[in-house]
Amino acid sequence: MSGYYELPLLILASSMVPGLIIFMLPEEAVRTRITLNMSGALLKVILVGIVIWGLSNGQQYETRLPFLPGLELVLKADALSILFITLSTVLWLVTTVYAISYLENSPNRSRFFGFFSLCVTATIGIALAGNLITFVLFYELLTLTTYPLIVHRGTEEARRAGRSYLIHTMIGGALLLLGTVWLYSLTGTLEFTHRGFVAGLLPGHDTSLIIIFALLIAGLGVKAALVPFHSWLPQAMVAPAPVSALLHAVAVVKAGAFGIARVVYDVYGIKFASELGVTLPLAILAAITIIYGSVRALFQDDLKRRLAFSTVSQVSYITLGIALAGPIATIGGLVHLVHQGIMKITLFFCAGNLSETLGIHKVSEMDGVGRRMPLTMAAFTLGAFGMMGAPPLAGFISKWYLGLGALDAGQDWVILVLAGSSLLNAMYFLPILHRAWFREPVQEWPATNYLWHRETAWALLLPPLFTALLSLILGLLASLPYSTLEWARFITSLEYSP
Amino acid sequence: MTMSEFLLLLTPLLPLLLAAPWLRRFIPGAIYVAILPSLLLLLFAEKSVLELSWLLLGSGLGFAEQTPLLLSMALLLWLPAAFFLSTQLQRSDGALSSEIINQRYSTFFLLTLSGYLAAILAIDVIGFFTFSTLMGYSFYGLLINGGGDSAKRAGLVYLCFLIIADLLLFEAALIAVVATDNLSFSAVRDANLSIDVVRTAKLNFAAVHTALPTSDYSSLYLSMVVLGFALKAGFWPVYFWLPLAFRAAAPPIALLIGGVPVAIALLGILRWLPLGEITLPLAGRVVQFSGLAAVLFSLLYVLIRRELKTLPAQLTLMATGLFTVALGIGLSQPDLWQQYGHLAYFYIVFLSLALALLTATIAWRHDGKQSADKSMNPTEVRVMWVERGSARIVRRIRSLGMETLPRLRATSLATAQYYLHIPVWKKALKNAELILQRWSFAITLLVLLGIVFVLVVINKLLLN
């Protein structure tokens, strides 16, 4: 037990305690609910800041709690977990601000914000998990806490989407658990270790290890929306915009992608996984997902559905970066874990603004909307260009390193996949921008009734502007110390250095 | 920071800042003010380099030997364009829609200017790529803003070319990293990796020029760079956006076509390629031949299509054809390029200014009226060209089949034509998605089994 035993627990509690209290609040207790939400989110930012500072000064943060004989629940802050925690914490704060305004007049807000906080608690738990069993527990908790958010609207469509989500993720969870138990029976440990704990431990068990790897990846691939486990994600877009933001950028798909990183790096170890021959098929699966998601996005008129298929495609960049099994591709994959989240949350916030303010849900309804909502559409433009990988936005940095990583790993075919995906991204994002900025509006938009003739409420406008600016800064200032890129380089050096 | 360095930074930064409409409210004549730092740079700056290690993957701006010439071109081009534009903006009827269009003109004008100036001053591959991308997309905005169907069509074609060109140049930049071993790939492969090794050194043009001639990738790099910039500049035979743009663009924007996208693409070729240092006789001859073909084609074009508004496009084709011939000679005989290569910069400046002058004269004769919109068929624009083109080919073959082949063959071609329609594929994909949703559990298990089987087989093969 180290001197900083409590801090990982405190980080978890900063969202769990407000969440549990919020459940008990009556609907009318708006101020108390907002205060609890915001103080929890801000406290988490401060605590994560302290951990980052401590880690960079050589401190260690680890909590161990007894769970089963021979197994402990371990919460541990390391370089990889910090990358994910920082993303989730910052975006949770922004999403909370957005959700408070977005759901201002909707029913069941206490239920919503209660599960919202628990959902983030589960995500932080996944990030901090120091062994595979802790990871699995929080992974399942995430499934259970996200389901009520997806069905929040209570419509038949929402219930159908929720059912689909639950079936998919429960099957995924079962496969993950099966793989974990099998692995434990073989190794007797589940502790995450740099360069993996499986390597060298089990000579002669290659077939078992391959099957376990497939089970683990299938379980994680459901949340990471790898084809063919992805169909729940486009269905889940019926959920309110803040939930979509949570699913696509902060929590669920990221948890899947992060899990794949943990399995490849800290369970199997990249070198051993590569020797076992499991990384190339994973890279091929990721490449198929990248192209398939982009092609499907091309044909969607529903804006959120288009963005959902775009997520299917973009999240697999992370898996691709990991599966290419080279240091430079790893940097690309890890950087994209953060960059994709920030760019995609911007797009979902903007889609939410269009729907909430003007009732626009479809791309075909967006003609001339840039005139009525210029700031929202400016943020959307930055997010879309970032997704296409245009410089100097954050997406460019990810694609640059993925491309170089592919060449370094001798997988030249990946360059074609990246080029094809960029082309398809342009084909489904640029028509939206063209409609919004250059076409004449086909209808008279409702007049603005916000203070100083703003296009929408402050709390809806500031989050996408903040995240759009962030996606610009992360690309433009990629080489600054403590940038995502530098942090990803640091993690990679830990993983690959002899 | 010295004054030269400050001016180097300010030259692209000021137009970029002034592109924000709310900032322009406080600065009258913003489009003229934005050009001012480049004038000061031209007058007062000395040879210098501003390292911007924090920018992107490490970048920089520099005032080199050719910079005064290129800055003079910029001033002679952008000042009249700004004057033309402000005259046009003053002429607007004051309606809200006109006001919005005017605001957007100013924004895109300043964004294009910023990207243009930064590209001129860029000293590395990534910087040039970034700034020319900013310029390219902003120029698309300028091209289609407030225009009719013909402007939209020109914009669409230009945009398609731009996207493909950027993809090619992105790949070329990746190849440049490999060729120059800029990421110390060898060190990475030897597992001597540390953060410092992975840190990207700048892809300076000088480093690229030194490393590429001895690299195995030089031909691939050359092809990608030439094709990428050829698409951007509208070289023959990938020139389609050029006549459309000249015909449809508003006069102040038409003035910039030769000097902005075309000139920066030519400059890109000079900057990205190690001309005078690399000998590629075969590639040189191919490039020379394509240049000669372009010149002949443009001569025919001038004779056949006597349309005044596309005359600058035809002359641009001819001029870029001549440039290509020179490029081909430079590739096959580098010693000649070393002697005369510097003249290429003068050629770009001359071409930009001559085209601007010609366009202005034509615009003056036409009194700024756009006549091309009437000749466009608006419904034609909505059909995707891929669909239209492929359908046309199949229809042609089908009719041929009807006449010459058995009926069965003709029916197969009819089926092929059906499958070439995009709605069919949309429907097929949607159905596939539904099947995936309904049978998710079974498919998951099946795929899992498949994956396990493949992995086991691969492993067995690896072990053997």
Image (cartoon, coloured by chain):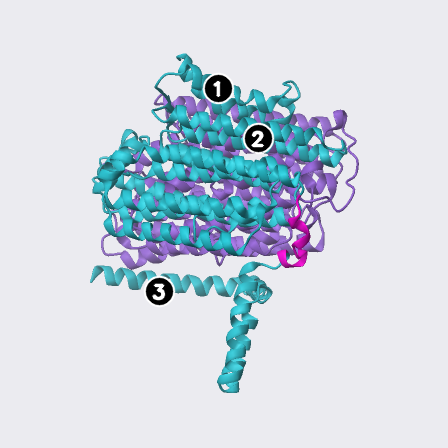
Chain colours: A purple, B cyan
* Point 54% across, 25% down: residue: B15
Q: Amino acid at mark 2?
A: Ala
The answer to whether the residue labelled 3 contacts the one labelled 1, judged by CB atoms less than 8 Å apart, is no
Horizontally, is A206 left or right of A244 in the view?
left
**Relative image position of residue A245 (x, y in whole percent):** 59, 41
Q: Amino acid at mark 1?
A: Leu
Element at badge 2? helix
Query: How far apart are the two marked residues, 2 and 3, measured between alpha carbons?
Result: 66 Å
As drawn, the label of residue B453 is 3
Q: Earlier in the sequence, mark 3 or mark 1?
A: 1
Q: Both on one chain, marks 3 and 1?
A: yes
> Quarter holding the C terminus of chain A?
top left
The correct choice, above or below, for A461 with respect to B68 in the image is: below
Kindly identify which residue carries mark 2: B81
Kindly identify which residue carries mark 1: B39
* Point 55% across, 77% down: residue: B414
Residue A308 visible in the shown view: yes
User: Looking at the image, is mark 3 or mark 1 nearer the viewer?
Assistant: 1
A23 and B425: which is toward the camera: B425
Q: Earlier in the sequence, mark 2 or mark 1?
A: 1
Magenta segment includes A377? no
User: Looking at the image, is mark 2 or mark 3 nearer the viewer?
Assistant: 2
A421 and A481: which is toward the camera: A421
Q: Quadrant of residue B186?
A: top left
Q: Both on one chain, marks 2 and 1?
A: yes
The residues colored magenta run B370-381
